[in-house]
Structures are given as C-alpha cells and as structure tokens.
Amino acid sequence: MPFEAQDRLALTLLNRIELRPGTQIALNTIEFTALIGLGAMVAGFLGALTGLGGGVVIVPLLTLVFHVDIHYAIGAALVSVIATSSGAAAAYVREGYSNVRVGMFLEIATTVGALVGAALVLHLHVSVISIIFGVVLLYSAYASMTEHEHASANAGPDRIATWLKMDSTYPTENGFESYHVRGVPQGFGLMFVAGVLSGLLGIGSGAVKVLAMDKAMKLPFKVSTTTSNFMIGVTAAAGAGVYLRRGYIDPGLAMPVMLGVLAGSLIGARLLARARVKVLRIVFSAVIAVLALEMIYNGLK
Amino acid sequence: MEKAEQRMDEMMGRLLRTGVILAAAFVLAGGAVFLARHPEPVTNYRVFQGEPEVLRTVSGIFHEALALHGRGLIQLGLLILIATPIARVAFSVVAFLYQRDWTYVLVTLIVLGLLLYSLLGAHA
C-alpha cells in the first residue's frame, strides 16, 4: 500500500507515547512495536510471578500510556490471555489438580457469558467500559491481597454435583484426598458473570472464577486455581473469535503484545520457585489499583 | 482407567503446548515481514477503524498468509492460537466418548458448538 509523503508524516505523528501530560514522543513502527513488546513482557512477567495474569494490565497500559483505542486494546489483551493460559494449563493438567468435569461444565456458562460480553461492547460507551474495567481491576487487586490457602471444610455430597459426577480427588502431602463439590447453580451463575467480564474487557477474569469455585463450590484452593487457569483459555477464545470477526484484533498491535506477554510469563513461571512472591504481589496489586483508579478517572472525565 | 486418563491428560498438555508454539512462530515470522516492509506506521491506533475484511475472516486470513503478507501471517498465528483451546475441547469430546460418559459428551459438544459459533457464525 503506497503512502503519499504527507500522509506518511501525518501517520508518523499519530502513534505517540505520553509519559507525562503534555510531553509526547512520536514513534515509528519499530520503536512503537519494541516499546509495546517490552511493556507486555514486564506485564506477563509480573502476572506470572504474582498469579494475577498479565492480561489485566495490558488494557490500561495500551490505553493510558500508548493512547490506543480501547477496542484494539481489548482485542490484543484477549489474544495474550489465550497464550498464557494455554501455556500454563499444559503444565497443570499433568499434575492432576484441575477438575476437568467441573471446568467443562462451567465453560458452558463462561462461553455464553463471553459471547454476551463481546456483544455488549458494541452498545456500551467507551467511558462506561473504562469505569467497569477500573472497578474489576480494583476487585482483582483486593482479591489477590486477601487470597490465602485455607483448608476447605469438606462438606457432604451435593445432589447436583453427584449427578454430574464432579466429586474427585487431588494430590496432597498425604497422597490423594477426595473432596465433594457443592453449590453448582451459584458457581454456574458466577461463571456467567466471569465470562461476560472476559468478553467485555479482554481479561481472563481469574479472580471471579476462583471466587466461584473457591467460595461457592467449596473446591480445594489448589483445585480451583488450576481449574480456573484451565478454563480461561476457552473463555477467552470465545470472546476472541467474535473480536477477530469484528475486526478488533489488529495484527500490528497484537503481535508485540502476544509475544511479549508470552515471553514474560514463561520467564516469570521459571523464576516462581525462587521469588519472594509476597512482597511482589503487594507491589503489583498497588500498581493495578493505581491503574484502576486512572481508568475510572478517565471514564468519568 | 486411571492410566488411560493420565495418558489423555498428557496428550492434552502436548496439544496445548504445540498450539502455542506454532502460533508464536507464525506471529514472529509475520512480525518480521511486517516490520521489514512497513517502517512507517500503517495504522493509527488512537482512532478505531476496524480491520479490513481479509484480516477478519478465516478464508481471508489464509489467503493473506499464503501470499506471505506480514499481517496475514500474524493473523494466521493468532487464528491458530484461538483454535488451540477449541481443539482442546474437541479432544475432550473424544475423551468422554471413549469413557462412554454421555452427560459430558453432551456438555463438551455444547461448549464446542458455542466456540465454533463465535469464530465462524456470530454476526460481526
């Protein structure tokens, strides 16, 4: 596609980075790609180390720092969510933690939700999406701060869960332990909400998924986190399919985001065993909270 | 039974890993072509315009990728990435068929149908 010289100049000035209000730097494609890739890599790295996922900070990073339109940003973020969740799920399924039946059954709710969320994007104003995004980010930051491994009170069998053969076992220090699943309708409802948020905001909604399985369905902590990871890729794929067909996924933008987040999360996962995650998690949660407030502020403006 | 399930899990893990690696390879190759050919910006990301038709449909993307266009190759990589969880669900349908677990054959078929609808059938 040939460009007139003046069009080229005009376009060069369009993709800018704004570090402080009023100071803008114009970037060429390679600089723009490299900076976004670097940012995505840091996001993926911190996301993997803290367990928050890199996807949550991609949209604020792209919209607040690079001034990318939120629709392009959501498309690129969704793609990176699929990459990291599939990469991580490959490692988890082998260990026998994730409950495939629970995951598959709840995926009905999350995929329907994702389709609804992706349809909602068309009807909601950018400022409304921005505010919802900020609120969900704040919740994610809060949830990760208060998250702790607790012994699940192993309640008795539940009629629906028994019928759906959801009760299972998971590996512990004392060998495989069995557990009962409860609260299937509540979990299903919360998963629908998680799906809507995923399709609307381009995030994995891991926080809401864990809430559904941990609190409502009383799954052991390790089982709910790994099953959630197992489901995130499928939920994001449902949203991404719609976004791709609607033209929200731009290859030039999604390329550095996907590769950056993937590389960052792989490095993060490798370092996970040695890192002092607790401090890092507090810092990253604080960063997320600041980004959340800025998203809300931008939406209200 | 336990052994068969374990083998299924391993195959599922391999499927996911292969999908992600293949997708990343296409995105990387496409990215190199794209950056080499377009040192100047082609898209203004501040204003949403939407992608052209050829980068939005499965047939269009294959066409662009076969022509070795950078953006087409990236988009093909992203399509492989989106297809990876879909392939995993399809794999689960087979796994539950193998176990004669009809409830979950139905459950996984519903999820698979929803995913295919989102990629191929949903109104843009």
Image (cartoon, rainbow, N blue to C red):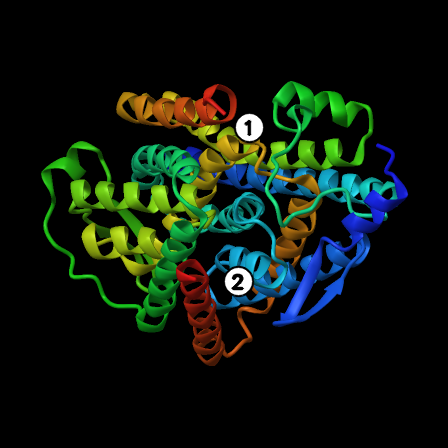
Q: Hey, which quadrant is residue B19 in on the image?
A: top right
Q: Which of marks 1 and 2 is in front?
A: 1
Q: Is residue A274 above or below residue A257?
A: below
Percent position (x, y) of residue A26? 76, 61
Question: Which residue is nearer to you in this view: A300 or A102?
Answer: A300
Q: Which chain carries label 1?
A: A
Q: What element carries label 2?
A: helix
Percent position (x, y) of residue A252? 71, 44
Give the residue displayed 27% in from the left and 56% down from the top.
A211
Q: Is residue A10 left or right of residue B46?
A: right
Q: In this view, does A150 lie to the left or right of B49?
A: left
**Badges 1 and 2, same chain:** yes
State the CA–CA distance, disc 1 to disc 2. Answer: 29 Å
Question: Which residue is nearer to you in this view: B22 or A252?
Answer: A252
Give the residue displayed 86% in from the left and 48% down from the top.
B39
For badge 1, the amino acid type reads Arg
Q: Earlier in the sequence, mark 1 or mark 2?
A: 2
Write down the residue under mark 2: A48
Q: Mark 2 Cα within 10 Å, few/some/many (few <14, many 20+)?
A: many
Give the residue displayed 64% in from the left and 33% down from the top.
B51
Q: Residue furthest front?
A: A6
Q: In which quarter of the image is the C terminus of chain A?
A: bottom left
Q: In this view, does A117 lie above or below B67?
A: below
Q: Which chain carries label 2?
A: A
Write down the residue under mark 1: A245
Q: Is residue A206 left or right of residue A38?
A: left
Q: In this view, does A270 lie above or below B85?
A: below
Q: In which quarter of the image is the N terminus of chain A?
A: top right
Q: Hey, which quadrant is residue A136 in on the image?
A: bottom left
Percent position (x, y) of residue A141? 38, 68
For badge 2, the amino acid type reads Ala
Q: Is mark 1 on a helix, strand or loop?
A: helix
